[in-house]
């Protein structure tokens, strides 16, 4: 079945550092890929997505490229801020008739001033 | 933000009592989902619905039941709550024919004593 593996962290960075959170997946067919972010005490918010190979999703300075050859969707940001401190989830949708999402276990990011 | 509300937002109950959580959407999306979030497990799908009165099990459905009598409401019932069901519960919605993107509610924090 479908699965997602991401860096478990926690990841601690200083403000303005470069961020990478690795995500790899296993899926049949051509899944859509997502990054969600969860701030403390809140629900998950869609951060970015990509629906086909070589697509790049981007939002709020974050980027991720759908790499079919390496089955990866790594999240990157060039310069993190304290306000980026949150839990980040990689997920995939295998399509089909129910649009279920399969999530990684999440990566806690803490950014210190 | 997607119009999704969950009630109650916090609940404390005792082992053996029934509990019902409600998810309400104003987006008229066809698909609705219930997840639980626990440390070390990420998000796990409990049940989902693909239309009024159409539901199916997810990966952790034991001890839970759901009902959907209207497009906008999806109820999750713990028939006889146990301490292992202490968790944060999230509802999500998705539009048919889309790329699998799900939008999440704010969550319900449930403590079973």
Image: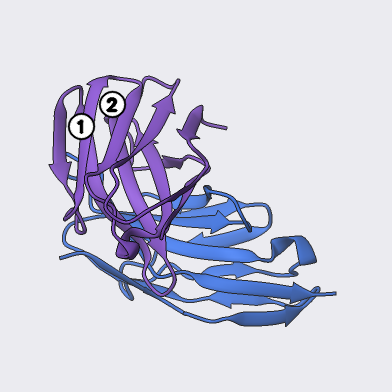
Chain colours: A blue, B purple
Residue at left offset 23%, top offset 55%? A30
Q: Which residue is mark 1?
A: B50
User: Disc 2 and disc 1: Cα gap in Å?
Assistant: 6 Å
Residue A17 is left or right of residue B93, and the answer is right
Chain letter of mark 1 equals B
Residue at left offset 45%, top offset 20%? B26
Q: Which residue is mark 2?
A: B30
Residue B95 sits above or below residue A76 on the image: above
Locate residue B59: give its quadrant.
Answer: bottom left
Image coords of residue B35 (percent x, y): 34, 51
Residue A3 is left or right of residue B57, and the answer is right
Image coords of residue A74 (percent x, y): 48, 70
Image coords of residue A105 (percent x, y): 40, 70
Decide which of A11, B8 is in the foreground and name it. Answer: B8
> Where does the N terminus of chain A fall, quadrant-wise?
bottom left
Residue B76 is left or right of residue A84, and the answer is left
Residue A33 in sight? yes
Locate residue B1: give its quadrant.
Answer: top right
Residue at left offset 31%, top offset 30%? B74
Mark 2 element type: loop
Decide which of B79, B62 is in the foreground and name it. Answer: B79
């Amino acid at each position: 079945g479908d699965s997602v593996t991401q860096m478990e962290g926690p990841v601690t960075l200083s403000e303005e550092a470069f961020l990478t959170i690795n995500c790899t997946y296993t899926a049949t067919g051509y899944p859509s890929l997502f990054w969600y972010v969860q701030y403390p005490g809140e629900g998950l918010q869609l951060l970015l997505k990509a629906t086909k190979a070589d697509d790049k999703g981007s939002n709020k300075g974050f980027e991720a490229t759908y790499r079919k050859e390496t089955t990866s969707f790594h999240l990157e940001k060039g310069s993190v801020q304290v306000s980026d401190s949150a839990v980040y989830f990689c997920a995939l949708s295998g399509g089909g008739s129910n649009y279920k999402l399969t999530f990684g276990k999440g990566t806690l990011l803490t950014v210190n001033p | 933000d997607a119009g999704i509300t969950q009630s109650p937002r916090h609940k404390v109950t005792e082992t053996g009592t029934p509990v019902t959580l409600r998810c309400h959407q104003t987006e008229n999306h066809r698909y609705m989902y219930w997840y639980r979030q626990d440390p070390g497990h990420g998000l796990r799908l409990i049940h989902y619905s693909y239309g009024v009165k159409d539901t199916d099990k997810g990966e952790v459905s034991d001890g839970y039941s759901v009902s959907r009598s209207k497009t906008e409401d999806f109820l999750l019932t713990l028939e006889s709550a146990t301490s292992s069901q202490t968790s944060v519960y999230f509802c999500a919605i998705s539009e048919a024919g889309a790329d699998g993107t799900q939008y999440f509610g704010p969550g319900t924090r449930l403590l079973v004593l």
